[in-house]
Image (cartoon, helix red, strand yellow):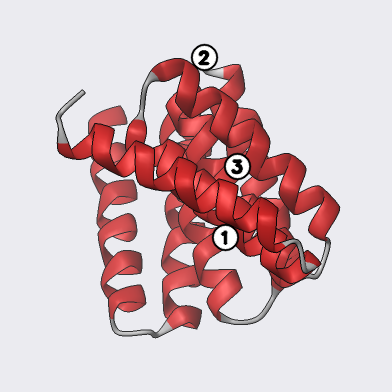
């Protein structure tokens, strides 16, 4: 029974992602919410956290930033509780982007810094690069060109690490 429920949940995730690929955000949200219900019934918190991240992206695309923020925060918390630092940091990147879109530069900066710290500790250079690019955008919005340049340089160092396979 559990396997059938899991398969149905994954079917809804696939349908949601296909709808998102077509930019049919409303259908994507509907399908992802169905998947989330099923993962919740099975107490599959790691998979549910991933669906929360996907929902956040859909809500962001719909301009529903409050809902996007809520979903990103849930995903980050669930990943942290599951002891998945990479998943947590990835969720924090999404949250940082939502906060930036909402104009909360201080919270966005803190969030990108937290993601950066986790990614750097884990030596996940793609994440280091993406968090630094987020910090660059925050600095530019604050009018701090010097800080933006430092973040850009750090992102470039991470890109080189990534290219070198380190």
Q: Position of residue 32 (x, y in %)?
A: 45, 60
Q: Residue at x 61, y 18 (%)?
A: 81
**Dot 1 corresponds to which residue?**
56
Residues tagged 3 and 1 counted as in contact (Cβ below 8 A): no
User: What's the CA distance linking mark 3 and mark 1?
Assistant: 11 Å
* CA neighbours of label 2 inside 10 A, class few (<14), some (14 to 19), many (20+): few
Residue 94 shows in the view: no
Q: Position of residue 142 (x, y in %)?
A: 79, 65
Up-down: is 6 above or below 82?
below
- Residue 101 place in picture, x, y as percent: 70, 71
Residue 158 shows in this picture:
yes
Q: Which disc is residue 92 wearing?
A: 3
Specify the quadrant of the image occupied by residue 113: top right
Q: Which residue is mark 2?
A: 83
Side of 18 relative to 30 (left or right)? left
The residue at 73%/48% (across/down) is 109
Q: Separation of disc 2 and disc 3 at Cα?
A: 14 Å
Q: Residues within 10 Å of mark 1 (few under 14, many from 20)?
A: many
Q: Is residue 94 above or below residue 161?
A: below
Whichever of labels 3 and 1 marks the residue nearer the N terminus, that label is 1
Mark 2 vs mark 1: which is more N-terminal?
Answer: 1
Circle 1 — which element? Answer: helix
Please give the label number shown on residue 47: none
């Amino acid at each position: 029974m559990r396997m059938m429920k899991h398969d149905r949940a994954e079917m809804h995730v696939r349908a949601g992602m296909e709808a998102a690929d077509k930019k049919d955000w409303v259908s994507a949200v509907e399908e992802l919410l169905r998947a989330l219900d099923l993962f919740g019934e099975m107490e599959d918190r790691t998979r549910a956290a991933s669906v929360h991240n996907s929902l956040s992206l859909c809500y962001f695309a719909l301009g529903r930033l409050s809902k996007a923020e809520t979903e990103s925060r849930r995903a980050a918390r669930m990943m942290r509780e599951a002891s998945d630092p990479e998943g947590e940091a990835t969720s924090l990147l999404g949250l940082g982007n939502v906060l930036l879109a909402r104009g909360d530069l201080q919270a966005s900066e803190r969030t990108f810094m937290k993601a950066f710290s986790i990614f750097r500790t884990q030596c996940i250079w793609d994440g280091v690069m993406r968090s630094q690019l987020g910090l660059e955008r925050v600095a530019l919005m604050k009018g701090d060109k010097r800080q933006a340049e430092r973040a850009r340089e750090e992102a470039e160092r991470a890109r080189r690490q990534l290219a070198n396979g380190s």
